């Protein structure tokens, strides 16, 4: 498939090249920011599974360069629309009152951004890049050292002395097409990202990660609800509706009293069951599910409340974010007149298919045929 046909089939792929993003996934983070205002007051960020670096680009442009993209660009658009309605004399509370101008965008001070990926990533200004495996325990000391140069790597501490405001993870495995296997591997990758986040997030921080929605994903929501006050599932407009991917946005990190980050027991915040004595009722300490008649799954989180003895039931909210009137990620769009197809901003540095391309080249090209005369009649 040529570049021009891909531009037509994937509008966000084309826009990413035109706007200088390394990958179309930059729009996913921008649309999540529009909905959740992820970067308000943020100066310290960890970007996991960062290659090729589109999410790190967003962080660099907003936090380091102070560009008006994401939430601030959305506020600009809304402000102009309110001014237009006011000048047109249309009725309505928003149109009648003087709209407040959007906040000023400017570079922030003391910004620290660390990007980690197993694949090498081309450098970005102001971004500390680490080539490491987030599923391996040795990555945590490397991350803590990158966040704090004074960190003693010989110590056994797994908690950051200077915690971060935001942890992002856009990682996904190389899918096999076996959905159950892909969802399982993705959940393990998310668990590794959460393990790192628990070590470096400050109380009140935010964790955003890609998930694959499957049969038992609600149990994952319940686990995240243990340490975050808000857990929301979001589907950006730029994420294809035909894909099972979504993004879990966890806000207000609130570790339980006495919680310490541990590699052996990452979510070791629950109470252990004691041996029952007599007819004493054993409190429930594990999340459980109830499927209602309308198909909604109710989760019962944690143990019974000490005060009123009522179970805490919760349903994870799911919402679409981004401009729903914008380009459809699953549709083909007509290219503008005079369109010139551009090359990708940053080609893959070490794609997993590189070896396959090299082997095919040794064989003489596609299927071993390099000339028209080599093709059998």
Image (cartoon, helix red, strand yellow):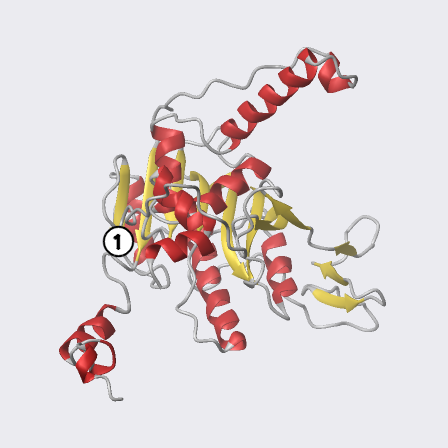
In the picture of the structure, the residue carrying the numbered disc 1 is 347
**Image spot of residue 1 (x, y percent):** 35, 64
Residue 366 drawn above or below residue 127 = below
Label 1: element kind: loop
Residue 281 spot, x, y in % from top left: 80, 67
The residue shown at (30%, 49%) is 344
- Answer above or below: position of 349 versus 362: above
Residue 219 vertical placement versus 20 (above, below): below
Of 101 and 1, nearer the camera is 1
Residue displayed at 28% across by 46% down: 345
From where the camera sits, is residue 196 visible? yes
Q: Relative to residue 21, is residue 171 depicted above or below?
A: below
Nearest the viewer among 244 and 95 is 95
Asked if residue 253 can be seen in this view, the reply is no
- Determine which quarter of the picture holds residue 56: top left
| Residue located 24% across and 88% down the image | 376
Query: Depth check: 268 or 208 in front?
Result: 208
Q: Is residue 227 left or right of residue 363?
A: right
């Amino acid at each position: 498939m040529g570049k021009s046909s891909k531009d037509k089939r994937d509008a966000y792929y084309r826009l990413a090249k035109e706007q200088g993003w390394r990958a179309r996934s930059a729009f996913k983070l921008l649309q999540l920011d529009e909905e959740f205002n992820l970067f308000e007051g943020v100066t310290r960020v960890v970007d996991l599974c960062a290659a090729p670096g589109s999410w790190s680009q967003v962080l660099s442009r907003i936090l380091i360069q102070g560009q008006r993209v994401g939430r601030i660009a959305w506020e600009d658009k809304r402000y102009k629309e309110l001014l237009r309605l006011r000048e047109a004399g249309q009725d309505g509370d928003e149109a009648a009152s003087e709209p407040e101008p959007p906040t000023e965008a400017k570079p922030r001070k003391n910004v620290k951004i660390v990007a980690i990926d197993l694949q090498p990533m081309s450098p970005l200004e102001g971004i500390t890049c680490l080539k490491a495996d987030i599923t391996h325990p040795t990555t945590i000391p490397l991350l803590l050292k990158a966040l704090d140069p004074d960190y003693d790597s010989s110590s056994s501490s797994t908690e950051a002395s200077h915690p971060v405001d935001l942890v992002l993870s856009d990682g996904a495995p190389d899918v096999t097409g076996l959905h159950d296997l892909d969802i399982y591997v993705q959940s393990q990758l998310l668990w590794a990202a959460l393990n790192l986040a628990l070590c470096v997030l400050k109380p009140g921080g935010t964790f955003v990660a890609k998930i694959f929605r499957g049969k038992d994903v609600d149990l994952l929501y319940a686990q995240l609800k243990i340490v975050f006050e808000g857990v929301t599932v979001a589907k950006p407009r730029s994420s294809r509706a035909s894909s099972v991917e979504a993004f879990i946005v966890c806000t207000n990190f609130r570790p339980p009293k006495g919680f310490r980050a541990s590699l052996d027991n990452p979510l070791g915040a629950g109470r252990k069951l004691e041996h029952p004595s007599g007819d004493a009722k054993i409190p429930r300490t594990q999340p459980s599910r109830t499927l209602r008649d309308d198909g909604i799954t109710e989760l019962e989180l944690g143990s019974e409340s000490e005060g009123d003895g009522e179970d805490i039931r919760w349903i994870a909210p799911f919402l679409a974010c981004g401009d729903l009137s914008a380009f459809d990620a699953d549709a083909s769009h007509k290219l503008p007149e005079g369109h010139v197809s551009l090359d990708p901003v940053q080609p893959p540095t070490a794609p997993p298919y590189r070896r396959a391309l090299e082997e095919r080249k040794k064989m003489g090209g596609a299927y071993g045929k390099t000339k028209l005369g080599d093709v059998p009649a």
